[in-house]
Image: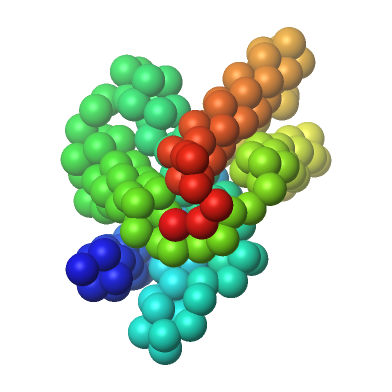
Amino acid sequence: MKGRLLIVINIVIIILELIAFVHDCFAFGVSLFEWYTVDSNVLQLVVSAMVLFYVLNGKDIPGFVTVLHFISAVGLAVTFLIAAFVLAPEGGVEYYFLENVAPINHFIGPLLSAISILFFEKVEKLPMKIIAWPAGVTLVYGVICLVLNAVNVLDGPYFFLKIHEQPMGTIILWFGIIAVLCVALAFLFYKVKWRKVRGN
């Protein structure tokens, strides 16, 4: 039963993420990859396709797929929290959660990703150090965006990345907040996923 639900969940994720990706391609063109939200959702699309491939072929899900899913699941959870508690209060709940494919990118995608990896994917227990990966990937994204903002190749896309408009203290503060948020969510996901068992 859990195997069938896993298949259904990831088919739904793939369909919804493809819809969101096509929409974002038309809306933003190549620049869609500037957005952390889009990057996390595209990674989830790839991960779900790989999960589906291994499950449908009766194979175990490899550790590297679980690591990638862990990164995407935490990244999507971060996008939900930032959108809900930072961006939506200023930019509007409708824009960040109700318009176009926003429900997929900011809520449905994060929810289904977490449900899939935490409760349905049978994988071997990975070492605790995995909780550092989402924060590391997120910081790499942030540093790249900062450099591109510094040389005026990129504008944002988030306010705390606009190095010419924000005090360095504000930028460092937001980098710290998001890094702590990533590690905290990763730790929570890890404990829920591998509570009292070696593999599930």
Q: Residue at x 49, y 40 (%)?
A: 196
Q: Is residue 91 above or below residue 50?
A: above
Specify whether residue 91 is in view.
no
Q: Is residue 21 above or below residue 198?
A: below
Q: Looking at the image, which residue is at 62% across and 23% down?
A: 180
- Which is nearer the eye, 66 or 3? 3
- Please name the colour scheme applied to the rendered image: rainbow
Q: Position of residue 138 (x, y in %)?
A: 65, 41
Asked whether the viewer can see residue 120, the reply is yes
**Most distant residue in the bottom direction:** 57
For residue 113, above or below residue 94: below
The spot of residue 97 in percent (x, y) is 25, 37
**Quadrant (top left, top right, bottom left, bottom right) of the C terminus:** bottom left
Look at 48% across and 82% down and name the residue there. Answer: 59
Residue at the spot 32% in from the left edge and 18% down from the top edge: 89
Pick the residue in front: 4 or 139. Answer: 4
Q: Is residue 188 left or right of residue 170?
A: left
Q: Percent position (x, y) of residue 168?
A: 76, 15
